[in-house]
Image: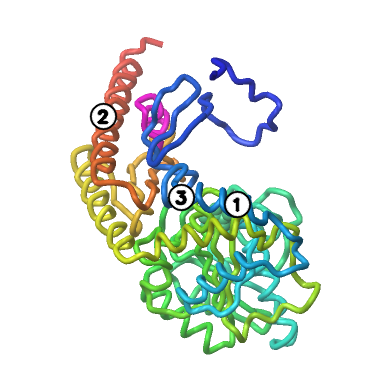
Amino acid sequence: MTPSVLDTNALMSITHRPPQVFMRGAGMWLWDQDGKPYLDFVQGWAVNGLGHCPPQIHDALMRQSQTLITPSPAYWNAPAAQLAHSLCEHSVFNRVFLASSGAEANEGAIKLARRYGQNFRQGAYEIITFEGGFHGRTLATMSACGKPAFAKLFEPKVPGFPKAVLNDLSSVEQLIGADTVAVMLEPIQGEAGVHEARPDFLRALRDLTRAHGVLLIVDEIQTGVGRTGTLWAYERAGIQPDIMTLGKGLGGGVPLSALLAIEQVACFEPGDQGGTYCGNPLMAAVGEAVLQTVAKPGFLAHVRERSGQLRAGLVSLSNVHGLGEVRGQGLLLALALGQSLGAQVVSQALQDGLLINSPRPDSLRLMPALNVTSGEVDLMLDRLDGVLRRVSRRKRSDAVIHVSDPT
Ligand SMILES: *Cc1c(COP(=O)(O)O)cnc(C)c1O
């Protein structure tokens, strides 16, 4: 039986959340404590690539939890070896470290780059990152972020993360010095509002970093595992990075992340890196099931088709409602609102049974399951149209009240 009131007070308050408590999910749908359904275009924050509670994850968890959950990080296990092998087979990388969260994978990438600097670059340690970039919430990854709201938090930060400007090669060039060991970026900045690193910029950045013996790290925690219509977003630029991090979509909803490196860069020494849950068989088995599903012939073509449909629908909503541009790739798309209406649209959508996200006050982000159907995309566009109508009607009536207010 579902209780009608759920007390969340014992949970530490860390962000503003709506009152709904989500009880159940299936595919593109979530149900709250009152049984109200919501069409979910947030999907765990670009996490549930196969939707809520997909059979592939259920089966992998059932099978592996009856076989081996964890032998200890001091021993090898087969699912971790299998997932690492599959990740290398499907990418340009040769070595994998498995972890549990995106921030943890990025911490690993930062440490690996610093280890590389110690071994091969006379102690170089600086990692150039980008304004607007997001890499996680540990102290080092927050220091790597270019998120303005993080700038003043938890000082002093970890030093060694100078910030360049996305798509501006000379801003990177100016920061490269003897201490520079790597450049790290998201192929598409997700949290900043879906801003793409242009393919020509990524190619020029690859040439520049190579010329200086500097590593190129791509944070594909949000863009990886099919999200942008190719298995990895770096493929679109035709580049070969030295290090890649994965999270979110890799586990499809369970805590799993990965740090991948090419052979010459995978230079951790015993004692440098580890973690109790790193490479545990239970999560690795899920990662393998997710990866095999996304890598199946036809799966990514479906993502690109749904992307075309969603993009065209958003463009036409933008025209009808006088909004801004549509940004992004694959099923990581944003609609610019042209004004700071994000919070109002998200809250009206919630009332109307639609979950969407506003990463910045002036834009909406859509990140459905990668196996979303064409009918679900149409239903979302229809609901969003209604939401935008209601929000703009309310704005007009507020304006009228304001103008005629005698005080
Ligand atoms: C979400 C995200 C992270 C952090 O991942 P967590 O699992 O929340 O630690 C890092 N980088 C990018 C690009 C992300 O989108």
In the depicted structure, whether residue 170 falls above or below residue 287? below
What amino acid type is highlighted by mark number 3?
A: Ala
Tell me the distance, in whole angstroms, between the alpha carbons under discs 3 and 1.
Answer: 13 Å
What amino acid type is highlighted by mark number 1?
A: Pro
Ligand 1 has an atom within 8 Å of the beta carbon of the residue at disc 1 = yes
Q: Position of residue 178 (x, y in %)?
A: 67, 84
Q: Is residue 146 visible?
A: no
Front residue of this view, candidates 290 and 44: 290
Residue that extends furthest to the top in the rendered view of this protein? 406
Q: Which residues are magenta?
A: 344-355
Asked if residue 353 lies in the magenta stretch, the reply is: yes
Q: Quadrant of ligand 1?
A: bottom right
Front residue of this view, candidates 156 and 127: 127
> What is the number of the mark on residue 255?
1
Please report contact status of discs 3 and 1: CB closer than 8 Å, yes or no: no
Say which residue label 3 marks.
46
Ligand 1 has an atom within 8 Å of the beta carbon of the residue at disc 3 = yes
Number of the front mark, 3 or 2: 3
